[in-house]
Image (cartoon, rainbow, N blue to C red):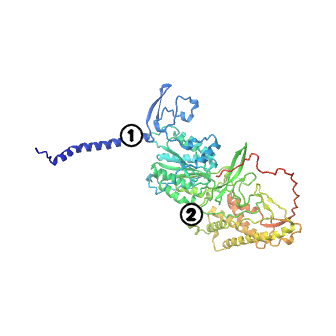
Amino acid sequence: MNFSTSPAAPRTVLKRLQPWFLSIVLHTLLLLALGLWVFDRLAGDAGHRIWATYPADDSAMADFTVASVSAYDPTVAASMTPAAVLEQPVAARLDTPPDLSPLDALDMSNPPSASLVSMELFKRSDVWGEEVRVGEAKKKLSNLTREASGADKLIAATGIGQAGEVVTGAIRSELEQGDTLIVWLFDASASLTHKRSQMADHAESFYKSIEAFNTKRRDKAENENTLFSSVIAFGQNWREILRPTHVGARAISAMTKVPIDTTGDENVMSAVTQAVQLYREQRNRQERIMIVILTDESGDDTLQLEDTIEYCRSAGVAVHVIGPNAVMGCERGSQLCQIPSGGREYAFWLPVKKGPETSLPERFLVPYWHESALPLWQQSGASVAANTPWYGGPYRERLHSGFGPFALTRLALQTGGSFTMLDEDATRSVDQWANRKDYLPDYASVNQYVRSLHDYPVRQFVVDAATLSYQQVELFVPPRMTFLGERSPVYPYPVLHPYVVPANFRTQLSRVLQSERTRIERASEVLQSLIVRLEDTAVPWQDETSPRWQASFDLTKGRVYATQARYLEYLAATQNVKPSLSLETNEITLLPDATLRSSESRYLVDSAVHSLQKCIAEHPDTPWAYLAQWELDVPVGLRIQPAVIPRPPPPPPRPPGGPGYSTKSSSGSSFSFPRL
């Protein structure tokens, strides 16, 4: 018998099975697609609509959206439940609760405890986001193209309430145009703790007003747009406190749990860039995005400004800033900090970076002389606020400009946002001058700014003089006025008058005077180069029409002439001092006087007075006018006042074996200042 099989048999079997395989594959793909669609609907922010009944009353019913509710037990008495939660009673949650953030451990009702815990959190790798690589913002949508804002978006507010109104108004405008994601980007400085709490209170009222505090997501069929919120904290690094959610209550809670950054660094540009990259590119968010920055400093990474602007514009992201009143012409200034302790409140001036208001220096930053009651010229750190002038020390470093820091202001305007300056009592600029917008800084890029200077001689001179004063800051330190007295490093910084044997005093006086005179001669030579430029009659100084540049030029010109006159008077007064002193003299002090010694000083003083008075008359109640008046307040000339410091009596003898005097308290307690 022949058992051989025909070669065509296997092919016939495969042919019959082919439709079955094809059907199985197609049905499997269809089931998989349906499963993914259902899973996406479950995981989406819209959630399920569920009918639930209260155990105590079967007739009482409520519908809610699973993904938008807070945990709530209807059996708990209403008096023990927050009113905000009662607005939307809920019986259950079907979604899996997220893992608790380490920030949830903060007890915000106990500020000292919360501060200590949050300081530790800043050191944890699971708190701050890793730096992400920023590429090109390819997620830009055609309807998100934004135009740069105008000067009408520069606003001054006297408190967080007014500033919050500006921000919430911008949110409403965005929400009218489509679904919106607002990113609350909060400075994590200790100095902002109170303002963050105030902003949370204001935001809570706003969320309730648009029915987005603790209720279900709006029904898209009603053509209503949805507001999503996220919270990010920044300092040296950045951290996403809250992922985007449409429940306003969660955003408010996250605002109160911002950890405190103790590094003192404020990398605001990096934080903005990372936030845009996170939501536009990494998570592919398609809503309209606006970032709201709350900060009291200008930032430490402002060199990234132009890249940050370009990136935000390419992603269609608007940046709104609530920021400080910038110190005038200085990068660093001082901020009033009030610290409660032992039932009292202590006030300190803390160093803080919140300036300047311009892209390049426009202020001739030389000190004012004869500030004997103020700190050392180079002193850093905190100083006691009591009995110290509101405008600062010799450089008037606490004088505010009336405008926001340049980098933050330009970022807001170029991205179609707004800058709201917190012009509170402790940081108010001179006064609320009505014509402030006539003196707006130039908010063009630095490159555009520099190119424009070549066409304006006044502006070129002002910037050159300001730059020179920054480069020669040590050369322009005020000369010594008391010989051989020393300034105390302890508040209120009096001049100490040590006893020196008269014979030794005369020997030391020559050496110290010569050192001071040599430095002043070098400073005078530097200033003379500026005076030569001012004396060039071929330059059309009178053609400048901008009130800001006119004020800056008159102030700069007047101070250049006045400072040069002071140098010449100092050299003349100290030229031959010893012959006029008695044998008992062991201290001399140089005091301001209206009499001039140098023949060249009269012309310089007349020129200075003319320019400074012109500045005051044409620009009253402005920072420039105050700076000019302070120069006029002190005469240029000097007179020598000799003194005889008596030999101090010998100290009383100590008891044998008696305890020495200790300056440390018995409790061993100390006081530290928070870094801003």
Q: Amino acid at mark 1?
A: Val
Query: Which of disc 1 and disc 2 is earlier in sequence?
Result: 1
Using residue 595 as the reference point, say whether residue 5 is left or right of it. Answer: left
- The crowd level at tag 1 (other Cα within 10 Å; few <14, some 14-19, many 20+) is few
Q: Position of residue 278 (x, y in %)?
A: 49, 51
Q: Position of residue 146 (x, y in %)?
A: 49, 54
Dot 2: element: helix
Q: Position of residue 89 (x, y in %)?
A: 51, 32
Q: Position of residue 673 (x, y in %)?
A: 68, 51
The answer to whether 305 is drawn above or below residue 98 in the figure is below
Using residue 547 as the reference point, say whether residue 605 is left or right of it. Answer: right
Front one among 136 and 462: 136
The residue lying at 69 percent from left, 63 percent from top is: 615
Front one among 638 and 576: 576
Dot 1: element: helix
Front one among 2 and 588: 2
Query: Which residue sits furthest front?
Result: 1
Numbered label attached to residue 446? 2
Residue under label 1, please give it. Answer: 38
